[in-house]
Amino acid sequence: MSVLVLGGAGYIGSHMVKRLVQNNQDVVVVDSLVTGHRQAVDPKATFYQVDIRDKDALREVFQKENIEQVVHFAAFSIVPESVANPLKYFDNNTSGMITLLEVMKEFDVKQIVFSSTAATYGNPVHIPIKETDPQQPINPYGESKLMMEKIMDWADQADGIKWVALRYFNVAGAIEDGSIGEDHNPETHLVPIILQAANGQRDHIEMFGDDYNTPDGFNVRDYVHVIDLADAHILALKYLAEGNDSNQFNLGSATGFSVKEMVEAARKATGVDIKAQVGPRRPGDPDILVANSDKARDVLGWKPNYDNVEDIIKTAWNWTESHPNGYNDK
């Protein structure tokens, strides 16, 4: 029996595939390669270049492979792009989920772990955010993911498809050996942007706003190492395999770090005096976004191995140094 990883050629998905293979699991990967990289997929996994919205092609994968569980990473995830082009996000993300669930129902596959987002909460009413807090997205990306959760819930009620949604904010780092890592074009995530400044691909890092209601004036975010995140998905698969009901879990470091603290940690991790400048605030950026992950720790037994942001950045730097141009270096 195999685990199907949708979006398994992407940043998080490829690390998930790597961890499953290391656990001697049979893995099938489906990825359109619109943003993913074929080189990122572990050679022991079976790969299909398929768009999740292509029902006939997806059906062929299910016909050929003995799939027992599904992990879903195949979603667009850039917030500003979702605001500028919301229909793209509802088409790929929300509509893609409907197609997937229809095929899962057809082949009697009853378990799915969904890579959701803490963006479903919108502007938080509590810090840290708990799973019981209101979900009121403030952008199409968060809305599309919340709709996907609701669709899975109705599919559970109607068809018995059990699901786990994992909600988190910022993912960083890379596998220790630097064989795979984060490679987006354009890059929008803070850690790789800081490291581009460290290796000379950028003149400096711009920190947007220094007048937030935080200890050092810079906004604070939650960071989880990509391997810890992959391991949480594996624990969620085990949770479903044991016959448990559908559920939702936040994944977070429990400690937020400001942008300034991230730059300072990167200077220590890399040994490079990274130049940083303060720029104007970006509209819609909350002061603090940190997720409470007590439920994941208690129910799933999730124990992150990386709780020091400097250690997280060091693993990302291993990847950056060995692949300064990302997968184009291969």
Image (cartoon, rainbow, N blue to C red):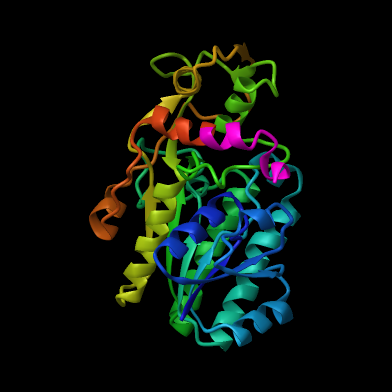
Majority secondary structure in the magenta region: helix
Identify whether 134 is placed above or below 27.
above
Assess whether residue 320 is covered by the magenta stretch.
yes
Q: Position of residue 227 (x, y in %)?
A: 43, 48
Q: Is residue 223 above or below residue 57?
A: above
Q: Residue at x 49, y 22 (%)?
A: 266
Read off the magenta span. 318-330
Label tally: 0
**Residue drawn at the location 60% of the way across and 12% of the way down:** 275
Can you name the residue that lies furthest to the left here?
298
From the top left corner, tell me how far across and down residue 256 is, in percent.
Answer: 39, 30
Residue 267: % across, % down: 49, 17
Q: Nearer the viewer, residue 66 or 82?
A: 66
Position of residue 116 relative to residue 193, above or below, is below
The residue sitting at 63% across, 23% down in the picture is 199
- Does residue 247 show up? no
Q: Is residue 277 left or right of residue 218?
A: right
- The residue at 51%/61% (across/down) is 17
> Residue 314: percent from the left, percent from the top?
46, 31
Question: Foreground: 246 or 11?
Answer: 11
Q: Is residue 235 visible?
A: yes
Residue 299 location, quadrant: bottom left
* 297 drawn magenta: no
Quarter of the image where one finds residue 280: top right
